[in-house]
Amino acid sequence: MDVNLRIAGEAGQGVDTTGRVLTGAFAALGLHVLASQNYMSRIRGGLNWFDVRIGDIELFSSRKQTELLVALTSEALEKLRGDVAEGGIVLFNGAATDGAVAVELEKVAKQVGGSPIMANTVAAGAVFGLLGYELDALAAHVTETLGGKGAEVLQANLACARKGYELGNASGRGLKAPGPAGAPSAVYSGSEAVGLAAATAGVKFVTAYPMSPSTAAFTYLAGIADEYGILIQQAEDEISAINMICGAVYGGVPAMTTTSGGGFALMTEGLSLAGVAELPVVIMVAQRPGPATGLPTHTAQEDLLFVLHAGHGEFPRAVFAPGTPEQAYALTRRAFEVAHRYRTPAIILTDQYLADMLKNSSPLDASTRPIDRCLVEKPAPGYLSYRVTDSGVSPRALPGSGAIVVADSHEHTEDGHITEDPDVRVRMVDKRRRKLDGMRAEAVPPELYGPKRAGHLLICWGSTYGPAREAADILGGSTAVLHFAQPWPFDATAARRAIESVGAGRVTCVESNATGQFASLLRSSGALDEAELMLRYDSWPFTAEDIAARCAS
Amino acid sequence: MSPIQTAAETAWCPGCGNHMILKAVPKAMEAAGVDPTSLVLVSGIGQAAKLPHYTRASMFNGLHGRALSHAFGIKVANHKLKVVIASGDGDMYGEGGNHFVHNIRRNVSVTAFVHNNQVYGLTKGQASPTSDLGFTTKIDTHGVTSLPFNPIALAIVLDCPFVARTFCGDKEHMHETMVAALKHVDGFALVDILQPCPSFNRVNTYPWYRERCRRVDGSHDPFDRARALELAFRWGDSGATEIPIGIIYRSNRPSYESQQPVLKKGTLVEQLAHA
């Protein structure tokens, strides 16, 4: 069983803080959690909410309906009351109102000696009380997270948690809540997973221009930079960011930039440079709905074909699209490895939903294990930066290693100098193109979830994985899911085989865009003939129920 | 250390100032004691940006306007490398203007030689950010009306620790100025090199520059910012007919690298090797 609780209020009211405290506390109890955030593009006011779904089985999707709404404002109460399930509870921050458990959170916080911002802790306590969990578990988590802020702050928060808990209990209301299920206590967001993977893979230089929803990964990396020995530089613009990392990888260190669609648009010339100069840059693109400024804090999968085709001219690239924070960790490391193995750009394509999603998982390895940069340590005399090889990959040496090392944006000779010789041009185009064969051969294959044979196959990529997977569970044994965590390059023959092996009479591509971008890619590659499209482009993420309902109709 | 070899054949026009600059760069490097094995020449796009291709040295010839971004990345990856930029007025002050401002603010330790011929050569004769008022081109048929970009003044305002101007027609001066710039190792060094373009700039010719360029005299204290700024505003025919050349401004602002705690343990490349 599972319960979905929603903390809703204005930006700046502590919606996020309360959500995070509860997420951590639930995970520490051994509950499975999946938290997601819905917020407006503003710093104060408006209506934001933070959903924490808890269960005794692993959770993969957010849910529209809530069993426990914590409404911090009247607006939150009015607008979200309709989502409360029958038998659900509303905890309202204010005077008594129809049917709701009313607690004046700030007032209570002050009564027990806390400050107004500790209203968040009162709310967390009340939630624990209403769900019937032990106060001790919340207190332990609060102690762990606030222990460093001094005894006074900690004691006041503990008093707030206790008072909130008592008020929750005293309301006489309560919910049946899932019991601890031995779930791991470690919780990661998609952004943190990308950042941690980059840091442990040996990234030494990270530069970006802030842009929602990519900033969380950049901020996380800045927070762990001292520990991992990473140089962080905020760039003057995205153009500079990508061109700086081109320089840094030439200089010898793994380097990354983080951005979203609009910023990536500015990076496309630099991406093309990385393609021709054969520089192993890694770019994280966190998607949000466009075009142009679009909906900055919402989610979409609209930029797959953009990242795939961005940059003038033709050059190979790899695109990874994780479905969970755990996948984001594994695929980010892989992006660095593939970029260096093939001397070409790799893109990690996430979105707001995944970037901000919090989910527990077994602890991700935080130890530094630098990837193989595939370097020639002691280049021989006559070293050629762009030597033509069977694999298309030219052995890479670093400046300062004794060799003359060249990076050039023109078409060039093997020693990296400008040429207009048509034969050399053809050899160089072919050399770069051959790299894609190797990349395709080692691409992450699509993962099948559910029965090996099913009447209905859902095809998805990126963060639609979780909702599709849970939809298949809701629908029982009739539905399977095929998830592509690497939308490019892929082996079209193997993909076709994977699709056909399910023997589904009905095939549906599920995507958060209005045109079915991955479906068209599958069709153009020959992996897929006909398929239905199930598209969502209202700027909200798919939910499992949403997909299941549309499958049934 | 053997000096850096240069190519006999180039794609530049006869009489182009770039030939003189190409000859001067290896000599200045040798005189300044630059180790060729730890050198990276960086450029964007333009006639000047071809210079690294005519040398036997490690080089990064990237995108138009982005030489400073490439150079910054190279320098942070391995700050023991000597990073020298060959750029033009369009590359550095036009397309790369934003990076010019922000990398001087950062004060990354690179040497920027900007071949300033006040015109676009590669694209055949359009106005550049430094073209004089009234300069006519096939695009600016009524003459340029935008105020010329003043790299020296802007660099001084941004407290660039080494700001100099030279003229490629004064070989001795160009050599001395390049050597001093290359020896400046803490922070950004800018050398604006006045350079005629015989193909597309019929106004700012060798005689035009020769008549106006005056070496700043020995009494000039480059650490005097107000005086430096006053020199920076002297240009050609506007009021005073002199263009001061020499080291216009210096300061002791700490370099970018010296302020990054993570670089105190060695270069990032070294740290990765020992991880």
Image (cartoon, rainbow, N blue to C red):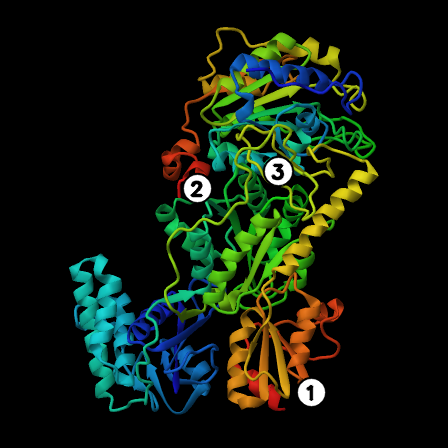
Reading the image, the residue beneath label 3 is B66
If you read the primary sequence from the N terminus, does the residue marked by circle 2 or circle 3 appear first?
3
In the picture shown, does residue A449 fall above or below B36? below
Task: Single out the residue that lies furthest toward the top.
Answer: B218
Q: Quadrant of residue A29?
A: bottom left
Q: Quadrant of residue A32?
A: bottom left
- Same chain for mark 2 and mark 3? The answer is yes
Q: Residue at x 63, y 13 (%)?
A: B240
Q: Chain of mark 2?
A: B
> Callout 2: 10 Å neighbours few (<14), some, many (20+)?
some
Residue B217 lies, in percent from the top left, at 53, 7
Reading the image, the residue beneath label 1 is A505
What is the C-alpha distance between the residues marked 3 and 1?
53 Å
- Quadrant location of the C terminus of chain B? top left
Q: Residue at x 54, y 74 (%)?
A: A465
**Residue type (three-letter) at the residue carrying disc 2:** Leu
Reading the image, the residue beneath label 2 is B272
Local secondary structure at mark 3: loop
Residue A380 lies, in percent from the top left, at 59, 31
**Residue A108 seen in the figure:** no
